[in-house]
Amino acid sequence: MKKWVNNNKLYIAGAIAGAIGGYAYYHFIGCASGTCAITSKPLNSTVYFAVMGAVLFGMLKKDQPKNSTVS
């Protein structure tokens, strides 16, 4: 479990930051009419922005060189 967490710290941080931002967006801006698919409910907004945050932070992760032996 520790290895998985260490390998995915940026994804986890992005998901947490996105979830906070998504709920804040719902709370402060939201959708007055209730017809917006993402921002009409706090759960939808939070999950959507958490996924987007994980994707965004995941793009910042540097690729690790693969250990391959060339003969």
Image: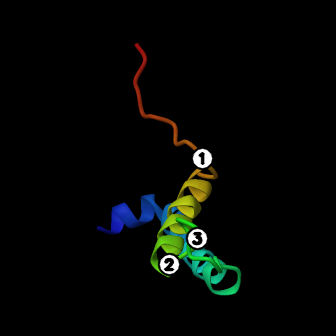
Mark 3 in CB contact with mark 1 (< 8 angstroms): no
- Using the image as rendered, state which of residue 33 and residue 42 is in the foreground: 33
Q: State how far apart marks 2 and 1 are (Cα).
A: 35 Å
Q: Horizontal and vertical percent for residue 7?
A: 44, 58
Q: Earlier in the sequence, mark 3 or mark 1?
A: 3
Residue at disc 2, secondary structure: loop
Q: Quadrant of residue 56?
A: bottom right
Q: Residue furthest right?
A: 29
Residue tagged 1: 62
Residue at screen point 53% across, 65% down: 37
Looking at the rendered structure, the kind of residue marked 1 is Lys
Question: Which of the 4 image quadrants contains residue 34?
Answer: bottom right
Q: Amino acid at mark 2?
A: Lys
The residue that mark 3 highlights is: 18
Q: Is residue 38 left or right of residue 1?
A: right
Other residues around mark 1 within 10 Å, as few (<14) / some (14–19) / many (≥20): few
Query: Residue shown at 64%/83% (left/top)?
Result: 24
Helix, strand or loop under label 1: loop
Q: Residue at x 35, y 62 (%)?
A: 3
Amino acid type of the residue that numbered disc 3 sits on in the rendered structure: Gly
Residue 41 marker:
2
Numbered badge on residue 27: none
Q: Secondary structure at mark 3?
A: helix
